[in-house]
């Protein structure tokens, strides 16, 4: 997936919580902030809470799964908030 961030002003991901899932996966619950450059829409009005699952092997990230919907991430992982 290619993300085009040029359409946003001050777009940021901020980690809210970090959970070690097992020896090879880490869950990061995040909040996104920023405004649409043209529309002025606040990204948190669309999807503010998301998550990323980092797969780590030998101290290196080998895969990242990004979720725009935090609830979907938690459901996929069999977790609750």
Image (cartoon, grey):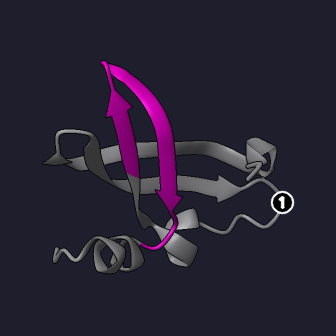
Residue drawn where x is 37% and y is 70% of the image: 73
Residue drawn where x is 38% and y is 56% of the image: 31
The one nearer the camera, 23 or 45, is: 23
Residue 34 image position (x, y, % from top left) = 57, 52
The reply, left or right, for residue 47 in relation to residue 57 is: right
Quarter in which the C terminus is drawn = bottom left
Where does label 1 land, which residue? 38
Q: Is residue 59 visible?
A: yes
Please report the bounds of the magenta region as a residue range: 53-69
Q: Is residue 45 above or below residue 1?
A: below
Query: Helix, strand or loop at disc 1?
Result: loop
In the rendered structure, does residue 55 fall within the stretch colored magenta? yes
The reply, left or right, for residue 13 in relation to residue 28 is: right
Residue 13 image position (x, y, % from top left) = 45, 45
Residue drawn where x is 58% and y is 66% of the image: 42
The one nearer the camera, 41 or 27, is: 27
């Amino acid at each position: 997936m290619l993300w085009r961030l040029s359409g946003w002003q001050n777009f940021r991901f901020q980690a809210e919580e970090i959970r070690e899932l097992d020896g090879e996966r880490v869950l990061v619950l995040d909040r996104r902030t920023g405004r649409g450059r043209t529309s002025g829409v606040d990204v948190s009005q669309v999807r503010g809470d998301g998550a990323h699952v980092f797969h780590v092997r030998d101290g290196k990230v080998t895969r990242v799964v990004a979720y725009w919907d935090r609830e979907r991430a938690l459901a996929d992982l069999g977790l609750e908030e």
